[in-house]
Amino acid sequence: MKTFMIPDESPLRMEDYSHTPVTVSGKRAIVVGGTSGIGQALALGLAADGADVIATSRSEDKVDETATLLEDRGAETARITCDVTDRDSLELVRERAEELFGGVDIVVASQGAISRETVLGVDDDDWEFVTDVALDGVRRVTQTFAPAMAEDGGGSIINISSLSARLSMANLPAYSAAKGGVEAFTRASAKELAPDVRVNAIAPGFFITPQNADTYAEGTEKRARIDKRTPLGRVGEREELIGAAIYLSSDAASFVTGEVLTVDGGFATSAL
Ligand SMILES: NC(=O)c1ccc[n+]([C@@H]2O[C@H](COP(=O)([O-])OP(=O)(O)OC[C@H]3O[C@@H](n4cnc5c(N)ncnc54)[C@H](OP(=O)(O)O)[C@@H]3O)[C@@H](O)[C@H]2O)c1
């Protein structure tokens, strides 16, 4: 029986309208790009809700710092680096998780790469750098973890997309194309990996992280335009993405796959 099928004896089949709790307590998670910004907030949020979490990225220092924060929240973890452009390094993370946890239930792909260029000016190196990390990186993460998750009874993958998959933003052609690809790849993966592995994406709006701290700093013209167009009137706090990730990776989302959940204060719904 697959994890995400509702068994005959499940309380969900009873007519008391009880629902599966929205929690990841007891689950085992990997957050790739989980040592800074959004990925780190998601890693710590999953841990605070009771998951064991490995947060991995290229930098040993960041991995170590985040592992200490995870341990502070009671999670079992491991200190292991990876680079999503290097398939072998992802394989080592999978093996480490297997040794430590006995398997993986949740994988979040939150690694980031950005390059600000025009459509006509972006060169092959910039294009390949961004798409290799942001799009091909998501493919490698899925290919590394999904087969073992499926064999182990099922799991949930969450790919971090962006509003730029749908809305044109100046000087981000490679990033936008990569994120459009991430959403299409999420749907393709959801179809192919069902019913064992559910695959969804989160599309964050504007959140201040090391990637964009200068561009969207308070007092800049860009920040004022974002705040004005956003119905909720402000940028997001990283912690405001945790609930979305917990929901999508919990058994409460057992019938949700191929979806992109936007968390943007309403920005994408607002014209002027
Ligand atoms: N911030 C926003 O407003 C916003 C909005 C929409 C979408 N997003 C998306 O959210 C995700 C996280 O962005 P962020 O703003 O949190 O950026 P961030 O703070 O710069 O974090 C990026 C993370 O990715 C890791 N990373 C970078 N290259 C990697 C590689 N080749 N292999 C493995 N890990 C790698 C970094 O660690 P190392 O340097 O140690 O590798 C870091 O942990 C990205 O996918 C981004 O596109 C962000």
Image (cartoon, helix red, strand yellow):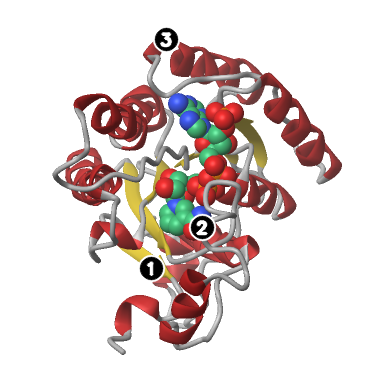
Q: Give the amino acid type for the residue marked by disc 2 in the picture.
A: Thr
Using the numbered discs, state the Cα–Cα distance from disc 1 to disc 3 in whole angstroms: 32 Å
- Assess mark 3: CB under 8 A from ligand 1? no
Using the numbered discs, state the Cα–Cα distance from disc 1 to disc 2 in whole angstroms: 22 Å
For the C terminus, the image quarter is: bottom left
Q: Classify mark 3: residues with Cα within 10 Å, few (<14), some (14-19) or many (20+).
A: some
Q: Classify mark 2: residues with Cα within 10 Å, few (<14), some (14-19) or many (20+).
A: few
Q: Earlier in the sequence, mark 2 or mark 3?
A: 3
Q: Does the rendering let one see residue 49?
A: yes
Q: Identify the residue under disc 2.
A: 215
The residue at the point 59 percent across, 67 percent down is 240
The residue at the point 45 percent across, 76 percent down is 226
Circle count: 3
User: Are the residues tagged 1 and 2 within 8 Å (C-beta)?
Assistant: no
Q: Give the amino acid type for the residue marked by disc 1 in the picture.
A: Thr
The single residue placed furthest to the left in the displayed view is 120
Q: Does the rendering let one see residue 255?
A: no
Q: Is residue 185 above or below residue 161?
A: above
The residue at the point 29 percent across, 52 percent down is 171
Q: Quadrant of residue 253?
A: bottom left
Residue nearer the viewer, 143 or 172: 172
The residue at the point 29 percent across, 31 percent down is 126
Using the numbered discs, state the Cα–Cα distance from disc 2 to disc 3 in whole angstroms: 34 Å
x and y percentages locating residue 117 in the rendered image? 29, 44
- Assess mark 1: CB under 8 A from ligand 1? no
Residue nearer the viewer, 3 or 74: 74
Q: Earlier in the sequence, mark 1 or mark 3?
A: 3
